[in-house]
Amino acid sequence: MSKFPFIFSLFTTLFGYSQNQESEPTFYSEISKKVASKAYYKLKFGNPSEIVVNDTIFMANSETWIEKNTYTFKSDFEMLVKKYRDNEFIADEIIKLDSNKRILNYEGNLKYEGGKRYITKVNYQYFKGKKIKEKINDSGETYMRYTVAYDSINNPTLIEHTIVGPDKTRIQNINYDYSNNHFILMDFNYQGRLEEEIKGNINSDYILDKNENGDITKMYWILTDKTEPFIHEMNYEYDEKGNWIKLVKNVISPDGTIKPYHRTYREIKYKN
């Protein structure tokens, strides 16, 4: 058994943020989406025609990524996305949304390692306490299915990765002890053998403060020990409609050291 160290958690979180939409869900990516979503195309107010996002990401290994995403809205339920990393074009995407701005259908022309490009198609289904994500081949058939189950406070409890056809399934099972702020992650391989068991911290009351716009300005990182808390601080600037256009995130370590985390700018064009 091993305890998941913060620095690796932070790196995993940052790396997970920057992956493309076809990446498989894990416990850490699902937790990250919950506490620090990168769905920068979502607005509280107004009807956008285009949103340009420039994001500087400071990695735990001192590497810095510069990302630029352009979201062009064909309608309220469909958008075209172009993604760049360090000025290199990496993805061209078509995304269809539901009324809650959740992704229903995804098609991406993505650049993978080695410079090759592939078309990836993904469909989503949402149920109470469950999400199903399916990767689709050129014939329109599902070849990989991801099922995520959530508890009543929307933390993942079970993640299944199924290779459709042979129906071989890999499982992550997560058990929480909220009274003591702990979790245990058990990772089983496709043969059903327990490959790894990880103990870590989980704080369900991680939010410390919000501003008058209802945005989080200070929070514990959800996977850190409260006795040695790593705290995220967020500062915002807003446009005349009340949507943020600048978001600065810093991480404060237990010894008081402040490190940059994200610098994000949004240019928002409205339809009306």
Image (cartoon, helix red, strand yellow):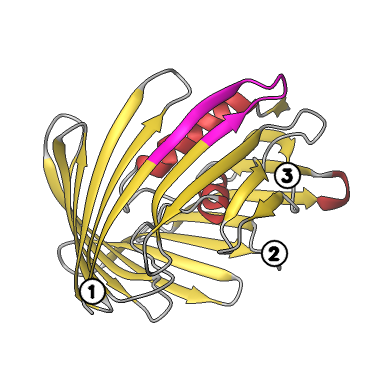
Q: Give 206 or 155, whichever is nearer the viewer.
A: 206
Q: Give the residue at the far right of this rendering.
A: 179
Contact between labelled residues 2 and 1, with CB atoms less than 8 Å apart:
no
Q: CA distance from mark 2 to mark 3?
A: 12 Å
In what quadrant of the picture does the C terminus appear? bottom left
Asked if labels 3 and 1 touch by Cβ distance under 8 angstroms, the answer is no
- Of pointers 2 and 3, the one earlier in the residue sequence: 2
Q: Would residue 162 appear left or right of 18 to someone viewing this image?
A: right
Q: Is residue 66 visible?
A: yes
Residue at numbered disc 2: 153
Q: Which residues are magenta?
A: 250-263
According to the image, label 3 marks what residue? 202
Q: Secondary structure at mark 3?
A: loop
- Can residue 193 be seen by looking at this rendering? no
Tell me the SS state at disc 2.
Answer: loop
Q: Which residue is mark 1?
A: 78
Q: Where is residue 247? Give x, y as percent.
A: 44, 46
* Disc 3 crowd, CA 10 A, few/some/many (<14, 14-19, 20+): many
* Residue 260 counted in the magenta span: yes
Q: Residue at x 32, y 53 (%)?
A: 21
| Residue that protrudes farthest toward the front in the picture | 240
